[in-house]
């Protein structure tokens, strides 16, 4: 089985990826938070830092692009390829309302003719290998059959399927019957993405779909950085390792961010997922969220690590 780390805006940048990889080197592919392709072919500072080769040593990293403009995708792909990348992922899954309103992400799925022309143009350019991360439709699952007919026309590196529609966001249960249909229809290697938060979730999924050879985890791998390790070896997360992970994040964020306020914001985003790993975490996490000074934050975190234990539990949205 191959294991992929899904991109998550605000969390899984290069600092997080590198520290995660140093403790848990069992991720086969890391995907970057999406790069917004534009006519100027310029990268935001965050995007540029995220894809610099020196920030991604020893990992297989796949930059992800968000756009519905073929020219912008091609030109941005060329710029990314100059950094030495050989695979790019097209984001057809983002459910954000502002993204969808522009016909991008999962909003592009409802524009089938435009999507087909877009794919034809970017594959003709042949800049790099291209994989696609998709939902099963914008408005209803019935859209997926036509989408699969489009995807099958092109030489995708692989197809990553998140079996929800855009309006589901990250709620409701992944539509496994439609995923099963996509698995049968696809001419490409298929990777599954969606709601694998525990070893039990993984084992139940594989029991249903033993033919799947790759799974992508997002919220589940942030909420438990050792989940792949647990799946493959049965070894759970060590609390001391998580504390080291935390301390290194703080140190490295302090080096690139302007002041404690920004570091607090980044770490509070992480704790939105990490808190569920601990027994009786509620009062500690409340203090973490309310902390305005870094000393208050550190005290709350230290107390949580000292007074509570890691439990076997998944992310609770």
Image (tube, rainbow, N blue to C red):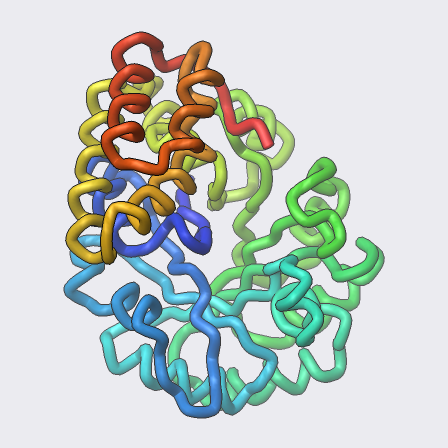
Using the image as rendered, state which of residue 314 and residue 49 is in the foreground. 49
Residue 94 percent coordinates (x, y):
60, 60
Give the quarter of the image for residue 34: bottom left
What residue is at 37 percent from the left and 50 percent from the top? 12
Picture quadrant where residue 95 is located: bottom right
Above or below for 306 versus 134: above
Relative to 70, is 157 on the left or the right? left
The residue lying toward the viewer, choosing from 118 and 250, is 250
Whole-percent x, y for residue 210 in the image:
56, 35
The residue located at (40%, 83%) in the rendering is 76
Locate the N terminus and report the quarter of the image it occupies: top left
Q: List x then y, in percent, for residue 82.
A: 25, 82
**Residue nearer the viewer, 44 or 189:** 44
Query: Vertical placement of 311 versus 167: above or below?
Result: above
The tally of labels here is 0
Q: Which residue is situated farthest in the front direction here?
A: 293
Residue at the (47%, 23%) spot, across then down: 276
In this rendering, position of residue 96 left or right of residue 178:
left
Residue 278 position by quadrant: top left
Q: Position of residue 62 (x, y in %)?
A: 36, 63
Quadrant (top left, top right, bottom left, bottom right) of the C terminus: top right
Residue placed most toward the observer, 131 or 280? 280
Q: Residue visible at 47% across and 74% down?
A: 36
Q: Is residue 219 above or below residue 145?
A: above
């Amino acid at each position: 089985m191959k294991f992929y780390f899904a991109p998550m805006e605000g969390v899984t940048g290069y600092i997080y990826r590198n520290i995660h990889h140093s403790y848990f080197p069992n991720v086969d592919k890391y995907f970057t938070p999406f790069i917004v392709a534009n006519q100027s072919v310029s990268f935001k500072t965050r995007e540029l830092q995220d894809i610099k080769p020196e920030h991604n040593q020893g990992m297989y990293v796949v930059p992800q692009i968000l756009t519905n403009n073929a020219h912008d995708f091609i030109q941005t792909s060329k710029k990314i390829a100059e950094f030495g990348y050989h695979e790019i992922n097209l984001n057809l899954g983002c459910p954000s309302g502002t993204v969808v309103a522009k016909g991008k992400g999962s909003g592009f799925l409802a524009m089938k003719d435009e999507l087909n022309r877009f794919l034809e143009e970017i594959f003709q350019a042949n800049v790099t290998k291209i994989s696609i991360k998709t939902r099963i439709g914008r408005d209803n699952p019935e859209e997926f059959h036509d989408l699969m007919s489009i995807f099958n026309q092109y030489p995708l590196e692989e197809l990553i399927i998140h079996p929800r529609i855009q309006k589901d966001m990250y709620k409701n249960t992944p539509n496994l019957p439609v995923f099963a249909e996509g698995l049968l229809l696809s001419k490409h290697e298929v990777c599954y993405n969606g709601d694998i938060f525990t070893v039990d979730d993984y084992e139940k999924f594989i029991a249903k779909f033993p033919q799947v050879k790759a799974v992508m985890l997002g919220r589940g791998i942030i909420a438990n950085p050792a989940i792949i390790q647990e799946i493959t070896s049965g070894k759970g997360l060590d609390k001391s390792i998580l504390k080291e992970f935390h301390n290194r994040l703080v140190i490295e964020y302090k080096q690139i961010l302007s002041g404690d306020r920004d570091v607090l914001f980044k770490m509070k985003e992480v704790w939105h997922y990490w808190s569920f790993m601990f027994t009786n975490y509620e009062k500690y996490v409340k203090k973490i969220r309310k902390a305005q000074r870094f000393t208050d934050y550190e005290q709350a975190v230290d107390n949580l690590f000292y007074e509570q234990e890691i439990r076997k539990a998944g992310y609770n949205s």
